[in-house]
Image (cartoon, coloured by chain):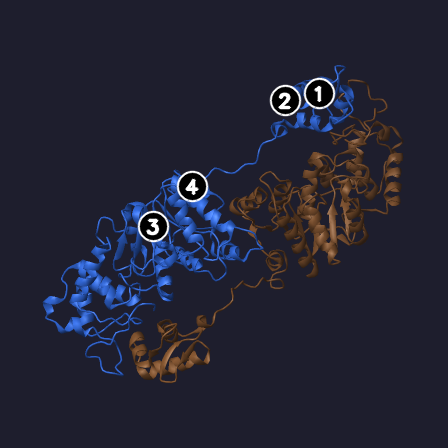
Chain colours: A brown, B blue
């Protein structure tokens, strides 16, 4: 709950049941916002954003009527945080948003990230700090998430993937948490790529506080966003709701390290539910921080990703980002015809064999063997003593 | 080629084409072995075991007639190693086998590993040193293979998997090479489990020579086997043919570490071709020694395996060896009902909130909230100051 005050609502009797939004309802009807944007801001206070209830009512009636129904009906959906809400509070919220240098983005706005519409419960609106056009950057983006208690391996991999994908024009979405999240944001910032931090609390609640500088850097170049109004504290259930936005606002999610109970598995589940690709980075089976990734691969159909190209392949547009098949170094003998390879294998390392013995050894005529030895010599694989006696080159 | 002598065949003119087995053919017809076992031993000298040619002729006509056809027809299939072969040589081979304490196992013998019959080119026979009944042990067995240039991580994992599977009654099959192979054999030996080494050369050619002691220990308790007659040198193409036996003589193959060009990928391919399960152990994506494993998972349908239970699940009999789903430690709040969880989240860490404020915060009646706080207190999650004011327990 942190610095948040629990208010006593006016007209709310002690021992009363549900929290009412009496203050707003008490004013003249004209004081309810007629404007879609204002209604969505107000709804974000009246109910808990990300909850099923509000999303359904808004989907059915639109935000303006949904707000009126909720307020006039004395219903609130925001269960866990009581709010003394009023029209004045709405104005305050809008002014506060402006003072923060933030903006409210709603569905229908040019920069509303349309990817979010795939969510069964899309955000009512987003508070956004930063210059990024969310719709544009989310169209080529990857969410990189993982354990807070990451290993050096994990943070290094997260930063490298983010930097490499950033250089390929992908925006990097994450949750600004310790460990993998922060490493991913930093990797993107390091190559001047766009990165988006999705917060569980308001965009003014830079959480964790030791990442205030990181979040400020993200807001300067990319975007810090939240479906929660300014001032709202990041508490448990809001992280889970936030995760669905991380999953939905990018083309796919990569989990770099995750213990078996990591919140990033929740993000991966959200991504799977809306049919977005999920990649998982493997790691040592002796590391509990990779166990969640291996479980995603074994049981949830996540794709093993081991480098930037493979992530791009998974996330990017077909054809444009196809990962090359990895190959080991080719050895000179790999490209030999079978007859020449047989000759090469029959050649001794130290002593010399004469061409007749070799020809018999491989079941070729002397003429065939001599031609083959010549080809091997050309490739630097066979050496002769000048008397038609041969050995392998060293 | 090592210590192997390239002989000049009697009656073989200089510049002649194919190697003949004139010495054997020259004797009276009665000197060709009528006995299936002897015919297969002789065929292993006349042709290169593991080659397509001999397997087909034997499959069509049986070993005795196949040998007669080859010898009387002056045909040899063993292309790369000429042999001065005779009936005396056959007797020598059989005596040498006996002197080595080895035996020749052929299809139809009680201990012939029937799993090998799934190969398109099964061995003609196997030379076996060691007490293991090959058919019995292969019925519950795992091949553990991988890079020669393994990392500490890889050899540790190979040894741990082999020991754990050995304790569950699995025999461990491998190729006695440096790195993963040796670690797997040693892991099995460490828990007195049965382990089988499949060699590319003869069972008297303990290769690599620095593993002579290891191979002797394997032969003392498990089995050292080869389709090559004693004395035959382990050379390149024989390792590839040997790999098909490793893949076929066990219930499935696990690759622990493999670079992108590792021979163990060849073993995995053989296993896949005869529909045996293939597991791959993931590792750091920064390790080239795990790149082949990741490729097997990404592109070849190999299953990620991270512990003994998962390997047993993949290899073992259905039901008997089912791996439990991994779970993280459960936290007390995970099992809370949603109402109690909301209460828990609303509780402050340091100050106390009174029950009325809390009830409003979570949208419950005071009675409901008080009951919930009581349940939290019972679980050690909430503490009261005695005045109906509550906070989280520390």
Q: In 3D space, how far apart are the residues under numbered discs 3 and 4 (Cα atoms)?
A: 16 Å
Quarter of the figure with the N terminus of chain A: top right
Residue A80 at least partly seen: yes
Q: Chain of mark 4?
A: B
| Element assignment for label 3 | strand
Q: Position of residue B73 (x, y in %)?
A: 19, 74
| Element assignment for label 2 | loop
Determine contact: label 3, label 4, CB under 8 Å.
no
Determine contact: label 3, label 1, CB under 8 Å.
no
**Left or right of A330, for residue B21:** left
Q: In 3D space, how far apart are the residues under numbered discs 4 and 2 (Cα atoms)?
A: 38 Å
Callout 1 environment at 10 Å: few (<14), some (14 to 19), or many (20+)? many
Camera-nearest label, 4 or 1:
4
Q: Position of residue A200 (x, y in %)?
A: 73, 40
**Residue A70 sits above or below residue A97 on the image:** above
Reading the chain from its start, which is encountered first: label 3 or label 4?
A: 4
Reading the chain from its start, which is encountered first: label 3 or label 1?
A: 3
Callout 3 environment at 10 Å: few (<14), some (14 to 19), or many (20+)? many
* Residue at the spot of label 4: B164
Q: In 3D space, how far apart are the residues under numbered discs 2 and 3 (Cα atoms)?
A: 54 Å
Out of A244 and B177, give the one closest to the viewer. B177
Reading the chain from its start, which is encountered first: label 4 or label 1?
A: 4
| Element assignment for label 1 | strand
* Residue at the spot of label 2: B379
Q: Position of residue B360 (x, y in %)?
A: 77, 24
Residue B383: which disc? 1
Q: Quadrant of residue A96?
A: top right
């Amino acid at each position: 709950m942190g610095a948040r005050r629990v208010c006593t609502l006016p007209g709310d009797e002690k021992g009363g049941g549900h929290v009412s939004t009496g203050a707003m309802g008490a004013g003249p009807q004209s004081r309810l916002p007629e404007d879609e944007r204002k209604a969505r801001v107000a709804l974000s206070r009246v109910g808990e954003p990300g909850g099923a209830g509000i999303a359904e009512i808004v989907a059915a009636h639109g935000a303006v009527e949904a707000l009126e129904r909720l307020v006039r009906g004395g219903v609130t959906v925001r269960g866990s945080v009581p709010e003394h809400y009023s029209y004045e509070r709405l104005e305050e919220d809008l002014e506060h948003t402006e003072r923060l240098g933030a903006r409210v983005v709603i569905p229908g706005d040019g920069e509303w990230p349309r990817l979010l519409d795939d969510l069964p419960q899309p955000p009512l609106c987003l508070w956004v700090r930063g210059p990024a056009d969310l719709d544009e950057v989310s169209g080529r983006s990857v969410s990189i998430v993982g354990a807070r208690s990451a290993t050096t391996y994990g943070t290094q991999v997260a930063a490298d993937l983010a930097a490499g994908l950033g250089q390929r024009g992908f925006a990097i979405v994450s949750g600004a948490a310790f460990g993998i999240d922060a490493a991913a944001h930093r990797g993107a910032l390091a190559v001047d790529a766009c990165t988006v931090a999705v917060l569980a609390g308001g965009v003014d609640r830079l959480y964790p506080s030791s990442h205030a500088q990181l979040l400020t850097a993200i807001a300067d170049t990319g975007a810090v966003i939240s479906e929660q109004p300014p001032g709202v504290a990041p508490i448990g259930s809001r992280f889970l709701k936030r995760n669905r936005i991380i999953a939905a606002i990018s083309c796919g999610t990569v989990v770099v390290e995750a213990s078996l109970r990591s919140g990033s598995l929740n993000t991966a589940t959200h991504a799977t539910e809306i049919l977005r690709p999920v990649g998982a980075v493997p790691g040592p089976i002796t590391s509990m921080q990779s166990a969640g990734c291996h479980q995603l691969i074994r049981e949830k159909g996540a794709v093993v990703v081991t480098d930037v190209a493979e992530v791009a392949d998974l996330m990017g547009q077909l054809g444009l980002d196809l990962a090359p098949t990895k190959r080991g170094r080719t050895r000179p003998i790999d490209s030999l015809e079978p007859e020449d390879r047989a000759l090469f294998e029959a050649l001794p390392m130290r002593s010399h064999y004469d061409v007749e013995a070799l020809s018999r050894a491989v079941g070729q005529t002397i003429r065939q063997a001599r031609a083959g030895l010549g080809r091997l010599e050309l490739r630097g694989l066979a050496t002769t003593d000048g008397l038609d006696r041969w050995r392998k080159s060293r």
